[in-house]
Image (tube, coloured by chain):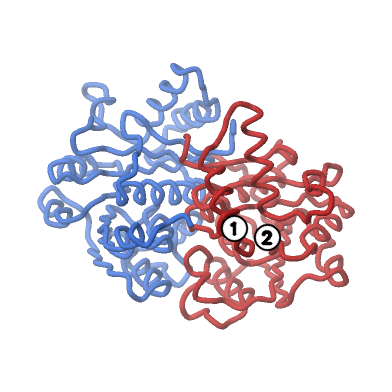
Chain colours: A blue, B red
């Protein structure tokens, strides 16, 4: 009723590249269950106990490579899944080789280096739309960088490096400007700046689940030629202020 | 940053009763990862292959009782989870025994009998708020029946039995009345009536993931004494029209 046979075929063979298997691990399962069957996942991290409060891992995965654990989970759901895993971190020199050939990308990389921006640039050069999911605890935020669209650097002040906080600050200002202030976001930004902690801000499963659904929906629209909003626009879903 | 130690303790010992382990299986995992650790789950069904497109089961679960499979999954994530499973269907005679002692209920039962309404009535008598999650394919719908609030029968025409379509029709009318029409919902209702199929309408993982997040958020608010909207109000989350 919702998905035609033709759309199901398009989705099935639409190759997704996932940079980062943290929040990416939740997105991958939702996408697989909707019918995406072709994944490349890149992450050099092992599963830690502290990931279990919001990522798609179980106790027995602790100490294992995230990519191996998520590969096992996806195969247990659908043995036909075509999944290529790279247990390493993305670098300026290996990124292009991994990225090319995909039709959509998810940038779920840590914002501790400029590698996420390099990832976007390479995707843009290869005409691949890039989804940027953000976990805001109580809400999911998603923006999409298009091949011919603006990059995230356009909202970064000179001399500063883009990170999650840049995006959240931008979203908060945008919503105030359009007369839809979201006070809970301002509260998060304020607390976060006070605590002056290392990035990224803490996250909750509530937003992981929301963002997984949002990414899957947007990828479905891209694969089937339906419209999507893209950066500098964004999607924000939460029960707060709903 | 988001959740205080006191709130974490409240959530941990807040007993949830889940009537139905279909969409309920996705809700349970999200709630567990946020810190809920006390579950009672009731479902007499076995896992079928057709559940895997939106429910929290894997191929190896096919043919097994849903409650055993979800129990195994939850324990693999957090061995400290306190989970009581009943591999049977709710009836007028067994429901009260299962329900009493819980602080929040999720009514994820099939609308093929009036048992879901009986479930609500018993919960109301025991002062237990009841969450009603609905999977609308592209969006999640949630309403909450409060101990002293209206029941779903108030939107049911005389001689008709309440089912998902009653709710979706109501939501569509409500949003039109308030000048926020959601045409995609009307389209679903129209197609559904044309196809004249057995309930429930088909579902997608996109809405399962959204609704899991919504239910977890609302249960968190109930457990920690924060405000929630309740029936005849509702929550609707989707990227469509966002």
Residue drawn at point x = 20 percent, y = 45 percent: A119
Between A213 and A160, the one lying in front of the other is: A213
Mark 2 belongs to chain: B
Secondary structure of residue under mark 2: loop
Q: Is residue B213 visible?
A: no
Choose mark 1 or mark 2, whichever is in front: 2
Q: Is residue B135 above or below residue A237?
A: below
Residue drawn at point x = 44 percent, y = 16 percent: A177
Give whichever of discs 1 and 2 has the lower sequence position.
Answer: 1
Mark 1 belongs to chain: B
Classify residue B160 by image quadrant: bottom right
Classify residue A37 by image quadrant: bottom left
Q: Which mark is residue B108?
A: 2
**Left or right for A213, reference B227:** left
Between A197 and A129, the one lying in front of the other is: A129
| Rendered location of residue B81, percent (x, y) | 63, 66
Q: Which residue is mark 1?
A: B27
Q: Is residue A2 visible?
A: yes
């Amino acid at each position: 009723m919702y998905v035609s046979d033709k759309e199901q075929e398009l989705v099935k063979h639409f190759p997704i590249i996932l940079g980062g298997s943290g929040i990416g691990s939740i997105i991958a399962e939702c996408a697989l269950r909707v019918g995406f069957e072709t994944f490349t996942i890149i992450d050099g991290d092992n599963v830690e106990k502290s990931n279990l409060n919001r990522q798609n891992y179980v106790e027995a995965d602790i100490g294992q490579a995230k990519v191996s654990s998520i590969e096992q989970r996806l195969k247990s759901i659908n043995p036909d899944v075509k999944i290529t895993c790279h247990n390493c971190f993305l670098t300026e020199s290996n990124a292009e080789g991994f990225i090319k050939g995909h039709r959509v990308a998810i940038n779920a990389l840590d914002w501790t280096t400029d590698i996420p921006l390099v990832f976007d640039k390479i995707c843009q050069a290869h005409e691949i739309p890039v989804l940027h999911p953000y976990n805001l605890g109580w809400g999911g935020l998603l923006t999409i960088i298009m091949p011919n669209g603006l990059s995230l650097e356009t909202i970064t002040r000179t001399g500063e490096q883009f990170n999650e906080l840049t995006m959240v600050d931008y979203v908060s200002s945008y919503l105030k400007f359009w007369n839809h202030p979201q006070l809970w976001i301002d509260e998060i930004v304020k607390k976060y700046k006070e605590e002056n902690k290392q990035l990224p801000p803490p996250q909750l499963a509530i937003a992981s689940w929301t963002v997984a659904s949002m990414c899957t929906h947007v990828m479905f629209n891209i694969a089937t030629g339906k419209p999507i909003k893209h950066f500098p626009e964004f999607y924000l879903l939460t029960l707060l202020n709903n």
